[in-house]
Image (cartoon, helix red, strand yellow):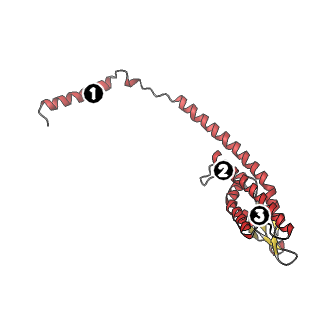
């Protein structure tokens, strides 16, 4: 199996608009949580295999697997938004290097044949994923700075536009010949109508 890097340019919404600062903060929180729990998961897995028997119960281990699988999609989205390339897995060059996977859950739980003929987790791949997480979080932090600067600049423009707009309400307080003429005509019409016995 061979690994490759996926290029990311930073995620935009479907309309092509860059993500807001709040959306990027959520990405940072999701990827930070994933990093903490994934790192603990790898340490526990290494400990289990080093001891030659499960230190945790099979039920507890299934729960750990499930938690990582649940966190992985949000972490995937955060990695895409970071602008820092993720990893992709391809088959051996001898068979044309077919694409295998590029989503976190598939990469983390990918197994490869061991020297004993059974299957084992791809420890190198798992560690590569962990090693890239701090860089991807740093990429998100840079995106956050850009988004905050963009929103601050937009807010300044709106405030300047609001400051330039001063509606003139003096006509409500000062006599206007047109208003007086039209108003007088309406009042005169009502009086005439009533005087002529209109119902």
The circle on residue 169 is: none
The circle on residue 26 is: 2
Q: What residue is shown with label 3?
A: 88
Q: Position of residue 42 (x, y in %)?
A: 80, 61
Q: Position of residue 53 (x, y in %)?
A: 83, 70
Which secondary structure, mark 3?
A: strand
Q: Residue furthest bottom?
A: 117
Residue at horizontal 20%, vertical 27%? 188
Q: Residues within 10 Å of mark 2 (few under 14, many from 20)?
A: few
Quarter of the image holding residue 160? top right
The circle on residue 183 is: 1
75, above or below 91, in the image: above
Q: Quick one: 68 or 128, which is closer to the camera?
A: 68
Q: Quick one: 87 or 15, which is closer to the camera?
A: 87
Q: Position of residue 150 (x, y in %)?
A: 65, 41
Q: Is residue 153 left or right of residue 166?
A: right
Quarter of the image holding residue 129? bottom right
């Amino acid at each position: 199996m061979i690994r490759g890097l996926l290029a990311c340019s930073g995620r935009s919404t479907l309309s092509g608009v860059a993500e807001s600062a709040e959306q990027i903060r959520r990405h940072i929180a999701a990827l930070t949580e994933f990093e903490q729990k994934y790192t603990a998961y790898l340490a526990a897995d290494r400990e289990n295999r080093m001891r030659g028997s499960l230190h945790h119960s099979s039920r507890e281990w299934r729960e750990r697997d499930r938690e990582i699988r649940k966190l992985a999609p949000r972490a995937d989205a955060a990695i895409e938004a970071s602008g820092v390339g993720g990893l992709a897995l391809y088959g051996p060059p001898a068979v044309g290097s077919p694409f295998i996977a590029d989503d976190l859950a598939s990469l983390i739980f990918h197994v490869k044949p061991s020297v004993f003929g059974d299957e084992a987790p791809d420890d190198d791949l798992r560690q590569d994923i962990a090693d890239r997480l701090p860089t991807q979080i740093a990429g998100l932090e840079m995106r956050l700075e850009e988004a905050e600067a963009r929103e601050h600049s937009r807010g300044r423009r709106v405030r300047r536009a609001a400051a330039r707009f001063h509606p003139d309400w003096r006509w409500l307080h000062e006599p206007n010949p047109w208003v007086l003429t039209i108003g007088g005509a309406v009042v005169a019409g009502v009086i005439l109508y009533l005087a002529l016995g209109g119902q």
